[in-house]
Amino acid sequence: MARVYNFSAGPAVLPEEVLRQAASEMLDYRGCGMSVMEMSHRSAAFKGIIEEAEADLRELLGVPENYRVLFLQGGATLQFAAIPMNLMRPRPDGSSGTADYIVSGSWSKKAFKEAKLYGEARCAASSEDGGFSYVPDADSLDLSPDADYVYICQNETIYGTRYPKLPDTGNVPLVSDVSSMFLSEPMDVSRYGLIYGGAQKNIGPAGVTIVVVRDDLVRDDVLPFTPTIMRYKTQADAGSLSNTPPCYGIYICGLVFKWLKERGGLEAARERNEEKARVLYDYLDQSKLFKGTARREDRSLMNVPFVTGSDELDARFVAEAKAAGLESLKGHRSVGGMRASIYNAMPREGIEALVRFMERFEAENR
Ligand code: PMP
């Protein structure tokens, strides 16, 4: 069996140990005589799986007692709508709720556009003028003190940027899309009102979306047209079991949480990720052929976009890399070039193999 080094932005590489364990439990989950895929979400066995997954996630991330953890469906994209529906508060005079959005890439731009369907979403800062190659300065934002929340996408997967510093939003809850950096480093959850992300990058298979939300934001007085299933209260009251959850995906997420815990938790993950990213950025910074596209201070530890400056050479690089077992290095279809996503489960050896390949390609194509 030959496994490639998979640099896909998501769905993405998962830890081999986790895949092996899932394979060994596929036909008979721990004496149940059936696969997790086949069991009722109301069974004792599945209850054990989801409760343990939540407990491990809480421990890993240090989730305070007054936050709820929800395992949902619909992808991160459904949260672009669920967040305004649940968090925008209609005003007594009948006017709609308001929120401030910081637009630092395609994902926050999409979330901003969606929020405008439901209330008064304002753009508090944008880096679109710079091709989203940087994150707007957290200290010079035009934030309104009466907004219902401030929204950021903390790691923009396509442009490879990550907030070097969180904005100070005072009493206004900070909402963060952490899809492409979830569990890659420690976070102080208490600084946020809500964090969320799709699992398919750093945590598990596509189909699970995790929302961590402060108790006071789980309310009944949501926008009146909010579908029952999209109300955080519905899912919080039901322990994410209001309807059938993505059972198998939650099980795999649980295995990944154990894998992370066994490897020293998020502090150790950060050290590994910083080291891995350094190997790639150090090479990019001295290369005469390849160039990283994100501003140095704002570079992501997880997604590393780069270009040669020639579309033809970029395409050749991606094709030759694939033939050499380095998979999915093509940049997002909206920006082109290349992108290496180097999530938790990408071993350092994968990045070293990529850098060796880039060195060779550079020598041959200079
Ligand atoms: N936010 C970010 C930061 C993403 O990278 C993505 C997907 N790549 C999304 C949101 C959308 O996620 P989904 O496909 O799960 O809806």
Image: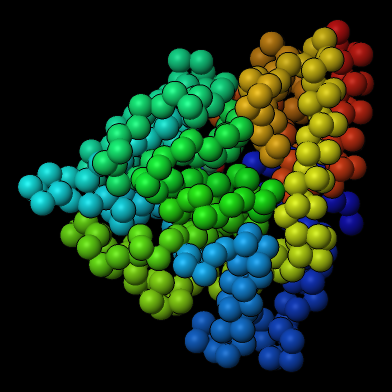
Q: Tell me, yes or no, if residue 113 can be seen here.
A: no
**Given the current orientation, which residue lies at the most extreme front position?**
170
Taking depth in this image into account, of 66 and 72 the one nearest to the observer is 66
In this rendering, position of residue 365 left or right of residue 205: right
Residue found 75% across the figure and 27% down from its top: 318
Where is residue 352? Give x, y as percent. Answer: 89, 35
Where is residue 346? Give x, y as percent. Answer: 79, 47
Q: Quadrant of the N terminus?
A: bottom right
The relative height of residue 52 versus residue 14 in the rendered view (above or below) is below
Taking depth in this image into account, of 136 and 340 the one nearest to the observer is 136
**Given the current orientation, which residue lies at the most extreme left position?**
93
Instruction: Identify the image's colour scheme: rainbow, by chain, secondary structure or one colour.
Output: rainbow
Residue found 35% across the figure and 54% down from its top: 82
User: Which quadrant of the figure has residue 251?
Assistant: bottom right
Residue found 92% across the figure and 28% down from its top: 356
User: Which quadrant of the figure has residue 293?
Assistant: top right
The relative height of residue 285 versus residue 67 in the rendered view (above or below) is above
Where is residue 33? Give x, y as percent. Answer: 70, 91
Q: Quadrant of the C terminus?
A: top right
In this rendering, position of residue 349 left or right of residue 260: right
Taking depth in this image into account, of 16 and 178 the one nearest to the observer is 178
Taking depth in this image into account, of 153 and 253 the one nearest to the observer is 153
In this rendering, position of residue 206 left or right of residue 296: left
In this rendering, position of residue 116 left or right of residue 280: left
Q: Tell me, yes or no, if residue 49 can be seen here.
A: yes
Where is residue 64? Give x, y as percent. Answer: 54, 65
Residue found 67% across the figure and 63% down from its top: 60
